[in-house]
Amino acid sequence: MQRQGRSAAVLGAGLIGFDLATKIMRSEVLDCALVVGRDPATLGLRQAADLGLATSADGVSALVDAATRFDVVFDATNALAHAEHAEALRPLKALIVDLTPSRVGKMIVPSVNGTDLPEHGDVNMVSCGGQASVPILHAITRAHRIDYIEVVTTAAGLSVGRSTRLNLDEYVDTTQDAIRSFTGVKDVKAILNISPARPPATFRVAMSMCGEDLDAASVQAAVAAAAADVRTFAAGFEVTACVVGDGRAFVAVEVTSAGDRIPAYAGNLDIINSAAIQIAERYVAAGTTGAMGETP
């Protein structure tokens, strides 16, 4: 049975953090108790306050020293800071949902291993490209032998905040590690393009694969099923291409945001935040005791 209003905090008041806060406000089982930044002039903090949310500019210490017990803490800062944050937050015994590409905690993709949650501690949401590609690639590699995977992610420059730009190397490395872990394929390459185009480009992930005995009908069925699973929490997830032939497969997806406080083209923010909310809500539904599930 779900418990209403479990206390959640957002650490980080940039593009990702503010959108997270608005999504938590829509949740039937999470209560956004605090939004934390480091600069009181941060736009995200001001916007959160305008929505009536409690805010602080004291960084992670605001969570550590708070009188409130947080059941879930979302870290939407940067990969370099997350290890320090995870250590500081450990005594809270909360689920720490890491939206940075830090590789500190267990990597989670909701439609693949999203029921395999700890009682508390650190889970990592990989990256926006990982959340968009892993469900598709996992589904294909369960049915077919794949020897090489290349994933090219394109995001609009206006949707990529300062923290993400600081973490470009970590983003690529973490996305590659996640694809290897969830598919078993060792030869993996991930590429991130930040597009300056105007109007801004819709978030897109293109996946190219080489393998054996790739059957078009089988691949297309696997892709369609995986996409349907993702759309249960990220409605703007759409397959725009699925081509199979001569030992190769190409799949492209686009993700548009649900609106909220971010523009439609910022599907990169929407998919990782929607995945994070899905995991937090499952954690609450499991009674914060965790649940057994399939691991990659």
Image (cartoon, rainbow, N blue to C red):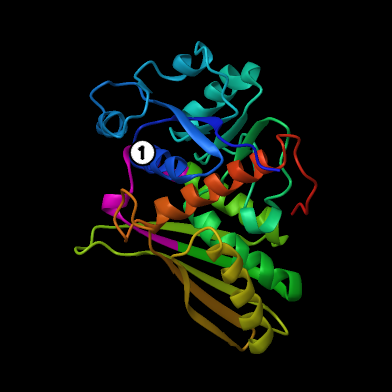
- What is the x, y in percent for residue 231? 53, 65
- What is the x, y in percent for residue 295? 76, 52
- What is the x, y in percent for residue 94? 63, 26
Which residue carries the number 1 mark?
18
Task: Looking at the picture, tell me which residue is in the foreground, 93 or 100.
Answer: 93
Judged left or right of residue 292, residue 51 is left
| Whether residue 167 is visible | no
Number of callouts: 1
Q: Is residue 7 above or below residue 199?
A: above
Residue at screen point 38% across, 58% down: 257
The image quadrant that residue 130 belongs to is bottom right
Task: Looking at the picture, tell me which residue is in the foreground, 4 or 59.
Answer: 4
Give the magenta range. 153-169
Task: Looking at the picture, tell me which residue is in the foreground, 101 or 293.
Answer: 293
Instruction: Let me know if residue 248 is in the magenta part.
Output: no
Task: Looking at the picture, tell me which residue is in the foreground, 100 or 91.
Answer: 91
